[in-house]
Image (cartoon, grey):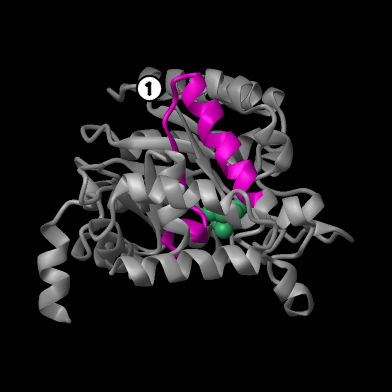
Amino acid sequence: LQKDLEVLRSEPAETLDGHRIPLWVNTGLITDALRSLDRGAEGVGLYRTEVPFMMRDRFPSESEQQKIYRQQLETFAPAPVTMRTLDVGGDKALTYFPINEANPFLGWRGIRVTLDHPEIFLVQIRAMMKASEGLNNLRIMLPMISSVSEVDEALHLIYRAHAEVLEEGFDIDMPQVGVMIEVPSAVFQIRDLGLRVDFLSVGSNDLTQYLLAVDRNNPRVADLYQAFHPAVLTALKLIAEGAHEVGKPVSVCGELAGNPLGCVLLMAMGYDMLSMNATNLPKVKSIIRGINMAWAKRLLDQVLQIESAQVIAAMVQLALEKEG
Ligand code: PEP
Ligand code: MG
């Protein structure tokens, strides 16, 4: 197995008929980053910055953050690293910043918190930018966007942070900025969002939760949390089409991207890149290397006619088994 992994690491993620789809990784700790390189990741599609925040008992200072981010950026340079701005609230708690709400998943989380606390946001953005000096492989990504005004407000702060670091004497290009698509409203404004930013990335974990109104962490309703629900697949297809209509690259960084069945459907929908846990990367790569894009597109067309998530998953599973 070790030998197989080593061979696979240097092979491209390319179908038999020559369709190439970059596979990136999701990270949080520096150990994730090191393990990812070992598995042949071509970039970081989601660095969850709340992870280092969760491991402390107070907000890390700007210079502390700069050091943490520098490690991630340096580990992958010149490959791109997509840093998501602080995504707390919902299922992600900071002991030193308690949020008590009756409906945390519908409450104060992600971009909503940081736009209400621009001082937290600006410190984080400045730290990211300073950390990228000389590397220029930073991409900034905004979580939990539900309307365009949030993007406009965040972009305004990002430009301000950039002006501030330049004024301090740093020499840094303006990084690419992207938006996570993980709230249903964002699906229906995909073009308006896409026009404002450089890239889009689907958070399929939250998008599934919000589309189906099923708590992603509640075991009682776990069987209703269906990644292959026809409504979820339809939304994913709309997102890919909308993003490409306005000429913007779109990826998936939720668990579905690292799912052996999910990756086939997402590739067929035209997603430009998939970002996943490093553990799943070799498996996804070997599946992609064993199939044809034309075959995957035909399978997707069939799947989109089906009304049941279970039948869809079974169909893709069977098709993959038959294919090799
Ligand atoms: C998602 O929601 O799919 C996602 C990638 O973000 P997180 O799992 O950190 O909420
Ligand atoms: Mg999310």
Q: Quadrant of residue 212?
A: bottom right
Q: The disc labelled 1 sits on which kind of residue?
A: Met
Label 1 neighbour load within 10 Å: few <14, some 14-19, many 20+: some
The residue under the point 49% across, 49% down is: 300
Where is 81 relative to 104, above or below? above
Nearer-the-camera pick, 50 or 319: 319
What quarter of the picture does the C terminus occupy?
bottom left
7 relative to 103, above or below: below
User: How far from the left and from the top, in percent, is residue 211?
Assistant: 74, 50
Check the image and name the residue furthest to the bottom.
1
Instruction: Tell me how many marks there are.
Output: 1
Look at the image and give the residue range highlighted in magenta: 232-259
Q: Say which residue appears at 34% left-offset and 44% top-offset.
A: 294
Give the quadrant of residue 89: bottom right
Relative placement, left or right, of 144 versus 195 is right
Instruction: State whether residue 196 is above or below residue 150.
Output: above
Judging depth in this view, the residue of 132 and 109 nearest the camera is 109
Helix, strand or loop for disc 1? loop
As for residue 144 lying within the magenta part, the answer is no
- On screen, residue 125 versus residue 111, left or right, reads left
Q: Position of residue 171 (x, y in %)?
A: 27, 22
Q: Is residue 88 visible?
A: no
Between 149 and 320, which is closer to the camera in this rendering? 320
Residue receiving disc 1? 174
Indicate yes or no: mark 1 CB to ligand 1 under 8 Å: no
Rendered position, 148 above or below 36: above
At horizontal 54% and vertical 44% (from top left) the residue drawn is 202
Magenta stretch secondary structure, dominant: helix
Residue 188: % across, % down: 70, 30
Residue 238 on the magenta span: yes
Q: Residue at x 71, y 74 (%)?
A: 222
Q: Is residue 185 left or right of residue 156?
A: right
